[in-house]
Amino acid sequence: MSSDLNRTLTLGPLVLFGLAYMAPMIVLGTFGVLDQDSGGVVPTAYLLALVAMLFTAISYGRMSRAFPVAGSAYTYTRRAIDSRVGFLVGWAVLLDYFWLPTVIWLIGASYLSTAVPGVPTWLWIVLFIVLTTILNVLGLKLATNVNLLLMAMQVLVLLFFVILSFTHTSGGLSTMPFWHAGASVSGVAAGAAVAAYSFLGFDAITTLTEETLDAKRTVPRAIVLVTIIGGAIFVIASYATQLVASTVHVAHPDSAAYEIAGVIGGRLFAAVFLAGLVITQFASGIAAQASASRLLYAMGRDSVLPKRVFAFLSNRFHTPLINIAIIGFVGLIGVFLDISTAASFINFGAFTAFTFVNLCVIALAIRRRTLTGARGWLLNLVVPLIGAAVDVWLLTNLDRQAIIIGACWLVLGVALLAYLTRGFRRPPPEVTFSE
């Protein structure tokens, strides 16, 4: 089998892929949580998150140009800084993979339990886990055209939601959603720390590098465009939703957008909104659980994790059955968590990885001696330094429980690294990513 892929993708399809991966409708799924965390200024929280992600996106673009391979933050850090540091960054990213399916299932369950009060939230979570686990064990893959259909459905529902929100508010436009007397910088920072969850996946574009025409130019441009367009969608949608939210009482913050949908569009639109959100969450849950189990399999295959367990494949279905079950078990912990806390677990790993991608740009510039001229200093030092500083600031504003668990996770990673390297005396095993 040839290892060469056909280079057919251009900028437009890459941007669409990135937006589909980000799932724009997530802005409504997490609105109520962000409304509480930010103190009622969700659009401002998204603006701050956009600034942080934009600086980091530029750094991702520069690293994808230098190392056009899979593995993202893990690979960049391993090659630009040190293999041991790269291992720990990859270990931090693993926290994202563990908790992403849980957050997806939590969001879907919270909305369904609001729509059907007689069914407890935990039962919806279990149902999500059982269904997605069965489908992933069977090896089901969502085709590209199905993903595009789901993307179209998301955009349509989101567009109607925004239009109905604007038409519902008789007072017209206002600056209140961005700032008001009760708002605070600490609240905005806390909201932005969770809002960054919506941006996760913009770097997925790097996985298509080998199928992109003029990849060294096209991929970095696509990463930045996806971040800007996605951020604009999040800010506009959250602004419209905040206008309505300030005039209505929301009984269940975790599913606030569903209640608002009923206010602006009646029962029919609320049902359409719920269907769109649940279908989106279900499809995302399948993909997230499959991705997490695949990463665990890669780590088991390369002896980073116990091979006998994590590299096991089902003889019948040829899928990493044990890994899929592990991710499902982690999802069960979501029964005892809220969306904000679970999302913070993800963002701990994300902000750690984002910080090091920014530092990778600086390390690579020093090694290659490209800190020359105004452009070189700006792109190779100033931009990544700002990106890293903002990422660290947002990380410190995460839920305290998430910071504690994240720190414990990193300590566990250091212990595993010490074991694998015989006391840091030899390079750690490298995780290889293959289709």
Image (spheres, rainbow, N blue to C red):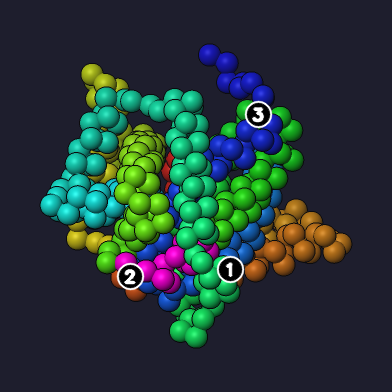
- Crowding at dot 3, Cα within 10 Å, few <14 / some 14-19 / many 20+, comes out as some
Pointer 3: what residue? 9
**Label 2 SS:** loop
Cα separation between marks 1 and 2? 20 Å
Q: Quadrant of residue 139?
A: top left
Residue nearest the viewer, comparing 95 with 301: 95
Instruction: Pinpoint residue 310: horizontal percent, then vertical percent.
Output: 29, 37
- Residue 8 is covered by the magenta coloring: no
Q: Residue at x 51, y 58 (%)?
A: 167
Residues tagged 3 and 2 counted as in contact (Cβ below 8 A): no
Residue nearest the viewer, comparing 304 with 313: 313
Instruction: Pinpoint residue 353: horizontal percent, then vertical percent.
Output: 50, 57
Q: Residue at x 38, y 26 (%)?
A: 141
- Crowding at dot 2, Cα within 10 Å, few <14 / some 14-19 / many 20+, comes out as few
First in sequence: mark 3 vs mark 1: 3
Which of labels 3 and 1 is toward the front?
1
Which of labels 3 and 2 is toward the front?
2
Tell me: 117 left or right of 33: left
Residue 249 circle label: 2
Residue 51 in view of the camera: yes
Residue nearest the viewer, comparing 149 with 130: 149
Residues tagged 3 and 1 counted as in contact (Cβ below 8 A): no
Specify the amino acid type for callout 1. Leu
Furthest residue to the top?
Answer: 1
First in sequence: mark 1 vs mark 2: 1
Magenta stretch in the rendered image: 239-250
Residue 406 lies, with reference to residue 15, above or below; the image says below
Pointer 1: what residue? 173
Specify the amino acid type for callout 2. His
Residue nearest the viewer, comparing 189 with 212: 189
Instruction: Pinpoint residue 338: horizontal percent, then vertical percent.
Output: 27, 62
Specify the amino acid type for callout 3. Leu
